[in-house]
Amino acid sequence: MDFNVKKLASDAGVFFTRAVQFTEEKLGQAEKTELDAHLENLIARADCTKNWTEKIFRQTEVLLQPNPSARIEEFLYEKLDKKLPSRTTNAELLGQYMLDAAKDFGPGTPYGSTLITVGEYQKTLGGAEREFLQTSSVSFLTPLRNFLEGDWRTISKEKRLLENRRLDLDICKARLKKAKQAEAKAAAAPDFQETRPRNYVLSASASALLSEEVDKAEHELRVAQTEFDRQAEVTRLLLEGISSTHLNHLRCLHDFAEAQATYYAQCHQYMQDLQKELHRCANAAGAPHPSTSAVCPNPVSSAFLSGPSSPGAAASSSASSATQRPGTLAMEDLQLPVTGTRKAKVLYDYDAHDASELSLLADELITVYTVPGMDPDWLIGERGNQKGKVPVTYLELLS
């Protein structure tokens, strides 16, 4: 206990001395040893690297895990050196809810079967998200964390040690300066007022003590300078390793961007497959509902497709619809005015339900147009000698 009290008192004294020294340096009342420009630049670069790495690390954590509670849980498991239990992603949870809802609504109903389809794809998206999170954590977050908790702590420790060596060197310089000033003052004004031998002995003794004090201060200065130079070299070598850190983080950044691109590409492919699956379901159930245009990549508004109609054309259309339904007419017998002829690219396969419709193959080009009075969700399509109605939601109109 006595040793600890003495050490505490010694540390308090050193702290007080350092505080006084820093204050005098700020006020310009004490000499300060400046570091060389190269070392100053290395220190500034290292501090900048630490600050931005910390910000990037924290924001990447927020990107990968927006839930603060989950991040705290991961932090505690990491500090306790325990394995984090597998956590279900939001997409997987949503998919499971959809599957459970489909069981209650009935898998055979249109809504239930669609819930099953979308739910399965949501779970697939969740699996892709989990793989992305794991890859990003290993390839990007871990190297950044290792730098902040490993390399940077070592650099910070050596920087603090260098600062202490600098302060010790400045103290030794100040002590030597005071010793030389005292010696010079004693040599310039010797005490010859008393002629007794005893005074000459005392004067010679004081001069010897001052000379010895100067020698001691010079020795301490040489030792402090050596320790400062050695610590400056150690710190310089560590700081020059920041370039290697940048190269390592550059590789990790490439890996993170590649994992992110792979994840988003998978999500895009899954959603395209889901759209095709939903269109096939709608095709199997009958003519697509107008609301299906909301899930198509390139929906076409009915106002854009509808052209101006003359009163005569409208009357002709009304007369035709009064005698029979347009859906039951053969396209060769439909002789209505043509408006807005243009090319269109087929987005999905489509099977005609009757003779009035035209079957489509994905990626083929056809000629389409509309006629006055026609349902705006349908167009007339032509491919060679074939002609028939085609759904707008399956097309991408070309200019």
Image: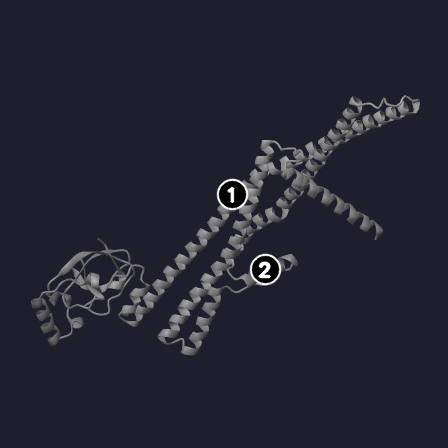
Foreground of the two, 131 or 160: 160
The quadrant in which residue 221 appears is: top right
Furthest-right residue in this view = 197
The quadrant in which residue 205 appears is: top right
Locate residue 246, reporting x and y percent. 54, 41
Kindly tell me whether residue 209 is visible in this rendering: yes
Foreground of the two, 396 or 170: 170
Q: Which residue is mark 2?
A: 74
Dot 2 and dot 1 residues touching (CB under 8 Å) = no
Q: Secondary structure at mark 1?
A: helix
Q: Earlier in the sequence, mark 2 or mark 1?
A: 2
Q: Looking at the image, what colour scheme do you see?
A: one colour
Kindly tell me whether residue 158 is visible in this rendering: no
Q: Is residue 35 left or right of residue 347?
A: right
Locate residue 386, reporting x and y percent. 17, 61
Cα separation between marks 2 and 1? 26 Å
Q: Amino acid at mark 2?
A: Glu
Q: Residue at x 16, y 57 (%)?
A: 341
Q: Is residue 1 left or right of residue 282?
A: right
Q: Amino acid at mark 1?
A: Leu
Locate residue 335, reporting x and y percent. 10, 65
Q: Secondary structure at mark 2?
A: helix
Task: Give the tally of numbered discs.
Answer: 2
| Residue 80 against residue 107 in the figure, above or below | above
Q: Residue at x 58, y 32 (%)?
A: 38
- Disc number for residue 250: 1
